[in-house]
Amino acid sequence: MPELPEVETIVRGLGRRVTGDTITSVWIGSRKQVLKSTAAEIARTIEGAKILGVHRAGKHIVFSLEKDLTIAPAPHRRSRGRPAPTLVKRNAEPGETESAQWVVHLGMTGRMVVCEPDAEIAKHTHLIATLASGRELRFVDPRMFGKLSVYAAAFDPGGVEPLDVSEENFVALFHGRKTPIKSALLNQKLVRGVGNIYADESLFRAGIRPRRRAATITRQQFGKLYQSVREVLREAIALGGSSISDYVDADGEEGFFQLQHQVYGREGEPCLVCGTAIRRVVLTGRSSHYCSNCQK
DNA sequence: ATACCGACCTGTCAGC
DNA sequence: TGCTGACAGGTCGGTA
């Protein structure tokens, strides 16, 4: 469900709450669909690790971890059924540390929740990390399209950050591509973080139809698209993202950008600029919304 | 390369 | 009340 602005909002909330805290133990559920690394790898990596910070890479949440190898990990909590994987014993020099990254992708319906340990465990909870502060960090995902993974080296999902990339580099990504521009915008290996809502909204602002082939778009229009994507994402971040159905950030707050949607979810309603009924077409299996008058 | 499709999952809502 | 189908913010893999 979450795209760049929602993940950014969640990451900021998580950063405020868990930076500097330490994961003392972890429980991982049995649903393997949500695990990209094995449960043992995840447990081994994050148990006993201090959270140095939380950042976003595209739609991924990245926890930067550091483990002091000279401190023995806390005893595992075994009350939730699954025995914690055993940690590898190793001899470490005093003060020796190991850094790692814990990466969470929320898929369509994933949530990261920081709560008290006595808070009710939501259905579809797949991971519970107990923190030294006494709170818990939980991953909940009904549809299980989300993914949990750990990396020893810096995590890089590929693609460029739309809010960091220069206009020239942005435009160059699409050069000569015959694919519909919306498909290209959704391709995370090109631009990372743009999803269905913000692709539609950006294309509306840029006056470009979703099916338009990238190779037929002029340099000037690409300049407009570059600006539009960045404006839309920045405005959405400022409003805490878009809340549709059940999205909430790490503090349980809803975003408000959905009130600014010009085309997404507005099939049949009048275009806010010209009054033409907004159309919905299916492109690569995704609903695409546009104004046939404002977008060419 | 690209484009289209189904698959992966559960939940919700509209319509009958 | 309950069934059915469509649809949902994402991504991957197969096939032409």
Image: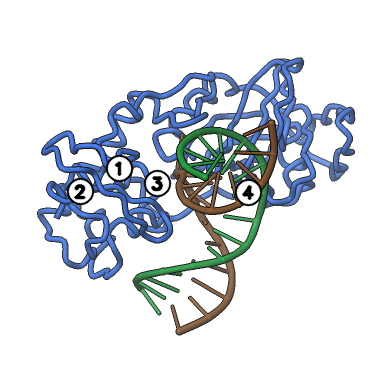
Chain colours: A blue, B green, C brown
Q: Are marks 2 and 1 on the same chain?
A: yes
User: Looking at the rendering, which quadrant does residue A3 occupy?
Assistant: top left
Horizontal side of A261 relative to A113 (left or right) equals left
Q: Secondary structure at mark 1?
A: loop
Q: Secondary structure at mark 4?
A: strand
Q: CA distance from mark 3 to mark 2?
A: 15 Å
Q: Are marks 2 and 4 on the same chain?
A: yes
Q: Which residue is mark 2?
A: A225
Query: Which mark lies nearer to you, 2 or 4?
Result: 2
Query: Which residue is painted at 27% across and 42% down in the image?
Result: A268
Query: Which mark lies nearer to you, 4 or 3?
Result: 3
The relative height of residue A5 versus residue A204 in the rendered view (above or below) is above
Q: Which residue is mark 4?
A: A151
Q: Are marks 3 and 1 in contact (CB under 8 Å)?
A: no
Query: Which residue is painted at 76% across and 15% down in the image?
Result: A118
Q: CA distance from mark 3 to mark 1?
A: 18 Å
Q: x, y percentage for residue A76?
A: 86, 30
* Amino acid bearing label 1: Glu
Question: Is tag 4's residue or tag 3's residue first in the polypeptide sequence?
Answer: 4
Horizontal side of A240 relative to A133 (left or right) equals left
Residue A43 versus residue A256: which sits nearer the camera? A256
* Amino acid bearing label 3: Gly
Horizontal side of C10 relative to A23 (left or right) equals left
Res A90 seen here:
no
Question: Is tag 2's residue or tag 1's residue first in the polypeptide sequence?
Answer: 2
